[in-house]
């Protein structure tokens, strides 16, 4: 059995507790300021951006190595 279909399901379930927390922090609960300034939103955002940068970097490196030189 491939693990590929399970990855989105696990990620969805892991993020669901963040959707249930009560309002808190700076400003309105659904404002951009809230998501960027509240630590419970800022660190997952930072980790997600870091993970995306690593993944894009790995794909770019792999693509660059496979590309024929002129």
Image (cartoon, grey):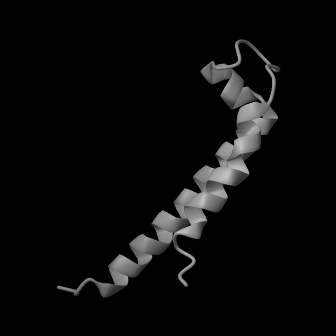
Vertical side of 28 occupied by 68: above or below: below
Q: Tell me where residue 17 appears, x and y as whole percent.
A: 77, 41
Residue 35, quarter of the rendered image: top right
Up-down relation of residue 68 to residue 14 (above or below): below
Q: x, y (%) of residue 5?
A: 52, 69
Q: In the figure, is residue 44 to the left or right of 62?
A: right
Spot the residue most to the top: 27
For this orientation, the residue located farthest to the front is: 1
In the rendered image, residue 13, in percent from the top left (x then y), is placed at 68, 52
Residue at 69% across, 47% down: 15
Horizontal placement of 61 versus 47: left or right?
Answer: left
Q: Residue at x 79, y 37 (%)?
A: 40
Residue 50: percent from left, percent from top: 62, 56
Q: Which of 20 and 50 is in front in this view?
A: 20
Looking at the image, is 46 positioned above or below residue 67? Answer: above
Residue at 34% across / 77% down in the picture? 63
Quadrant housing the C terminus:
bottom left
Q: Which of 29 and 57 is in front in this view?
A: 29
């Amino acid at each position: 059995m491939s693990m590929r279909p399970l990855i989105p399901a696990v990620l969805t379930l892991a993020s669901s507790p963040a959707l249930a927390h009560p309002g808190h922090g700076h400003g309105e609960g659904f404002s951009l300021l809230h998501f960027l300034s509240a630590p419970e939103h800022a660190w997952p955002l930072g980790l997600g951006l870091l993970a995306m940068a690593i993944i894009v970097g790995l794909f770019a490196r792999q693509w660059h190595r496979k590309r024929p030189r002129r």
